[in-house]
Image: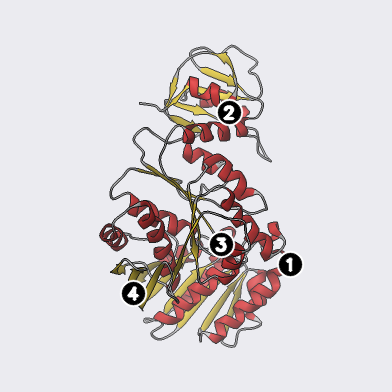
């Protein structure tokens, strides 16, 4: 049974009924090619096209639509609602639906680790309650309200990743979702071209403080902690750490060839041994973040331990594949200086014979791009990486700073061909780059040749 009623829509948006059909909708959709029966179509205006062009196609399957341009013809048996702005109507509807439910809403933001922390949090909460989360990277001003529109009467918690590429965007998302709890993973140089400087990135992430009553914060990110302490936040702060004693902290961290383990302590209360199949020191932080907020909400420590143990990770994020005696680390979803360094440290740690880094350009770094890439070249040398395949013009700059064997390529497919020719049994290979570099094509070339 659908959860969105026509009454809800009119109250949320102040829209006008142009044509009357269904009274109840099972969800909303912005893509006429993917709409399902029972859904409401929301045509959005993009840079290249306007969703209104596909209205008639969408309502062949869908049972209604928002419009900001009135149809030129009569539409029967479908509910068509006129609004001034279809995107704002979607956002207003999402906020209205969220306010109808008195359930915890958790918002997660930061430069790195957002998606894994979101998935971990949802997995932990999901052991005892039904959880709504945003799928994939639907974490912006369109994706987040789309996710919230899927809220049902059976959902008992909401976990939302929030991304931003400019000032004010976290505030906008919080105004839609109205979170009770927040998680701040870290601050780093991602999307800096939209912010200008690292201080603006921090202040944007801290826009969340205006809305939440409890915030979970990475205590080892001193730049972020400084921002919290200089803010006017009067709510509860829960610090987590992998280096110091905090409200929630890790001791005896052990990074295995694949996976990790550590003692997790809830300060002054209890502790447990965590074992996980996901790898890397940064995932210790992701586990601590998710566990901190789950414990605060009331999830028993034993349930947290079991949920982390069964969590399999997120596709294309430090995903291990073994082919013919070669270890591939596929971390191809996105890249920024912090995440690249973390992945390189993991490559160096698991190295048996040779370590090969196949790195694509880190995009959206603005004026910081050249220095950021040069620094990655220095990190490669410091970590004793043996071979560097630089993909793209920016990584070619990084190669100038690298002391080992270098190959350069213009694109991921070419890099894959180079890699396939030099691979040896026992090699460990990291493949990483910004989403726009299409680094999955490296593995496509490998799979065609092995």
Assess disc 3: are there few (<14), some (14-19) or many (≥20) residues with their C-alpha within 10 Å of its C-alpha. Answer: many
Q: Do the residues labelled 3 and 2 touch (CB within 8 Å)?
A: no
Q: How far apart are marks 4 and 1 (CA)?
A: 42 Å
Q: Where is residue 366 in the image (x, y as percent from the top left)?
A: 71, 64
State which tag comes first along the sequence, 1 or 3: 3
Give the structural element (helix, strand or loop) at label 3: loop
User: Of the residues tagged 4 and 1, which is closer to the observer?
Assistant: 1
State which tag comes first along the sequence, 4 or 1: 4
State which tag comes first along the sequence, 3 or 2: 2
User: Of the residues tagged 4 and 2, which is closer to the observer?
Assistant: 2
Determine which residue is flagged by label 2: 54
Going by the image, does 145 lie left or right of 318?
Answer: right
Q: Do the residues labelled 4 and 1 touch (CB within 8 Å)?
A: no
Q: Residue at x 39, y 26 (%)?
A: 2
Q: Which mark is residue 79?
A: none
Q: Distance between the residues labelled 3 and 2?
A: 36 Å
Q: In which quarter of the image is residue 224?
A: bottom right
Determine which residue is flagged by label 4: 324
Give the structural element (helix, strand or loop) at label 4: loop
State which tag comes first along the sequence, 3 or 4: 3
Determine which residue is flagged by label 3: 111
Q: Which mark is residue 367?
A: 1
Assess disc 1: are there few (<14), some (14-19) or many (≥20) residues with their C-alpha within 10 Å of its C-alpha. Answer: few
**Observer-nearest of 138 and 47:** 138
Q: Where is residue 112 in the image (x, y as percent from the top left)?
A: 52, 63
State which tag comes first along the sequence, 4 or 2: 2
């Amino acid at each position: 049974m659908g959860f969105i009623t026509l009454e809800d829509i009119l109250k949320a948006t102040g829209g006008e009924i142009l044509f009357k059909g269904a009274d109840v909708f099972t969800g909303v959709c912005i893509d006429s090619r993917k709409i399902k029966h029972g859904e409401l179509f929301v045509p959005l205006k993009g840079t290249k096209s306007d969703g209104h062009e596909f209205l008639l196609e969408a309502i062949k399957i869908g049972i209604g639509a928002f419009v900001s341009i009135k149809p030129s013809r009569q539409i029967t048996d479908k509910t068509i609602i006129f609004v001034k702005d279809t995107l704002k109507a979607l956002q207003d509807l999402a906020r209205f639906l969220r306010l109808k439910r008195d359930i915890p809403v958790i918002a997660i933001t930061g430069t790195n680790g957002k998606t894994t922390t979101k998935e971990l949090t949802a997995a932990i909460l999901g052991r005892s309650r039904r959880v709504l989360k945003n799928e994939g990277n639907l974490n912006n001003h369109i994706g987040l309200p789309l996710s919230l529109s899927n809220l049902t009467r059976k959902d008992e918690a909401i976990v939302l990743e929030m991304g931003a590429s400019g000032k004010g965007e976290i505030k906008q998302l919080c105004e839609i979702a109205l979170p009770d709890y927040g998680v701040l993973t870290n601050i780093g140089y991602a999307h800096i071209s939209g912010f200008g400087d690292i201080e603006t990135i921090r202040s944007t992430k801290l826009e969340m403080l205006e809305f939440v009553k409890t915030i979970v914060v990475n205590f080892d990110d001193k730049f972020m902690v400084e921002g919290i302490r200089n803010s006017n936040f009067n709510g509860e702060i829960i610090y987590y750490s992998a280096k110091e004693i905090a409200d929630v902290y890790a001791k005896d961290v052990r990074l295995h060839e694949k996976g990790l383990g550590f003692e997790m302590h809830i300060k002054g209360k209890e502790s447990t041994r965590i074992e996980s199949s996901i790898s890397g020191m940064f995932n210790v932080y992701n586990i601590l973040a998710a566990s901190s907020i789950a414990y605060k909400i009331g999830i028993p420590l034993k349930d947290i331990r079991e949920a982390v143990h069964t969590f399999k990770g997120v596709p294309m994020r430090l995903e291990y594949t073994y082919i013919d005696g070669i270890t591939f680390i596929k971390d191809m979803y996105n890249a920024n200086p912090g995440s690249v360094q973390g992945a390189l440290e993991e490559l160096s740690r698991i190295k048996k014979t040779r370590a090969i880094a196949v790195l694509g350009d880190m995009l959206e770094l603005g004026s910081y791009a050249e220095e950021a890439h040069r620094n990655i070249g220095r990190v490669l040398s410091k970590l004793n990486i043996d071979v560097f395949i630089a993909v793209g013009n920016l990584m070619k700059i990084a190669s100038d700073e690298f002391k080992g064997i270098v190959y350069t390529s213009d694109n991921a497919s070419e890099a894959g061909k180079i890699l396939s020719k030099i691979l040896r049994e026992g090699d460990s290979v990291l493949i990483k780059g910004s989403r726009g570099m299409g680094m999955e094509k490296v593995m496509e070339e490998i799979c065609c040749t092995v």
